[in-house]
Amino acid sequence: MRLAVIPGDGIGPEVVAEGLKVLRAVAPDVESTPYDLGASRWQRTGELLPDTVLDELRRHDAILLGAIGDPSVPPGILERGLLLRLRFELDHHVNLRPARLFDGVRSPLAAPGAIDMLCVREGTEGPYVGNGGVLRRDTPHEVATEVSLNTAFGVERVVRYAFERALARPRRHLTLIHKTNVLTHAGSLWSRTVEEVSAEFPEVTVAYQHVDAASMFFVTDPGRFDVIVTDNLFGDIVTDLAAAVTGGIGLAASGNLDASGTNPSMFEPVHGSAPDIAGKGVADPTATVLSVGLLLDHLGRADQARKVNAAVAFDLSTRDPEAQVRTEDVGDRLAALTGG
Ligand code: IPM
Ligand code: MN
């Protein structure tokens, strides 16, 4: 397995080191190449993602990314120039974000019940495409647009992927989240696509929720969700909510997938670079380790993925919830559990 590694900024390098420890324990054939991308490279050289680096990244089986972002970099530069550019250039049209409440993990909800959902967020369209502009900037009459792009091709492929995932799960239930009562153009495309593709998946039951109501149910009744499919921006928002109710972003994993397999997929914890705790050895690497699990699963190594997930489940169920997390200790425990 040829793996490109982008440790990135802040706690990124710390959590990635532990993720790699676990990966090597379970998959000794991994050959990893580090890539220096992120805030410090930009500050040193002005480079975000040189084309030559992008070409090299393409020649790997997968990418593991820690976190990108630094308070000294103006907002938007690293997001658009690096993270989103990677997702768009590598056609990561599925942004896969599981949210499961593990035994031993405290939810902020009083009575969370069982939560085990899989959010399939569209990754290359919506308002993220940069289709907009500004007129009369810095005047009282300034007008700004940010047009959400939704294509039949893009919606169909992510909806189909979500149905396939739903079919492979015990509950076989898919919820479309949108705002079809207001965003009638894009909403109609999404609803029609779900309806059409559902004909090919008669075993999968389908539900629909407006994004506002869905947000309420994430808090009042998260157990109702199994697989979710939604657009890029709604998916960004509801997956933070899903992470919050299942123990926080310290545990939230994600995969940016080119489901066609043409380009390498990229796996990253949902959390950011957390500069306030960087270098202290207290960042929880679990989200990165779970992202490694998604990576293995995506590369067809289901047995190895299962070992990683089982190690995390065991570790979380036996952790003292009051004790301070030590990054390396968690990585060592998980590596020992998976390698043994
Ligand atoms: C995420 C992040 C990114 C997004 C930002 C940093 C561009 O919030 O991965 O969820 O909006 O997708
Ligand atoms: Mn986000």
Image (cartoon, rainbow, N blue to C red):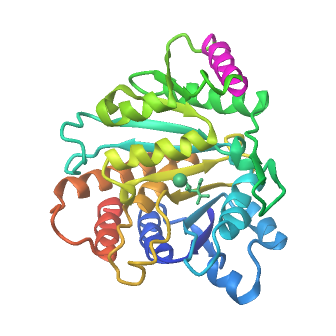
Q: Residue furthest front?
A: 140
Q: How many callouts does the rendering have?
A: 0
* Residue at the image position 49 percent from the left and 57 percent from the top: 270
Would residue 79 appear left or right of 147 to someone viewing this image? left
Up/down of 271 relative to 52, above or below: above
Q: Nearer the viewer, residue 139 or 195?
A: 139
Vertical placement of 298 versus 150: above or below? below
Q: Position of residue 137 (x, y in %)?
A: 80, 60
Q: Quadrant of residue 337?
A: bottom left
Q: Which percent across, then down, holds residue 230?
A: 58, 33
Compared across the picture, whether 124 is left or right of 136 comes to left
Residue 218 lies, with reference to residue 255, above or below; the image says above
What x and y, as percent, mark residue 177? 53, 29
- Residue 244 in the image, given as x and y percentages of width and height: 36, 49
- Most common secondary structure along the magenta stretch: helix
Residue at x 36%, y 50% (from the top left corner): 309
In this view, 230 is above or below 280:
above
In the rendered image, which quarter is residue 328 located in?
A: bottom left
| Left or right for 89, reference 180 | right
Locate the N terminus and report the quarter of the image it occupies.
bottom right
Residue 295 is at least partly visible in this image: no
The answer to which image quadrant residue 172 occupies is top left
- Which portion, as a residue range, is magenta? 185-199
* Magenta stretch encompasses residue 160: no
Point out the image quarter for the C terminus. Answer: bottom left
Judge whether residue 194 is colored magenta.
yes
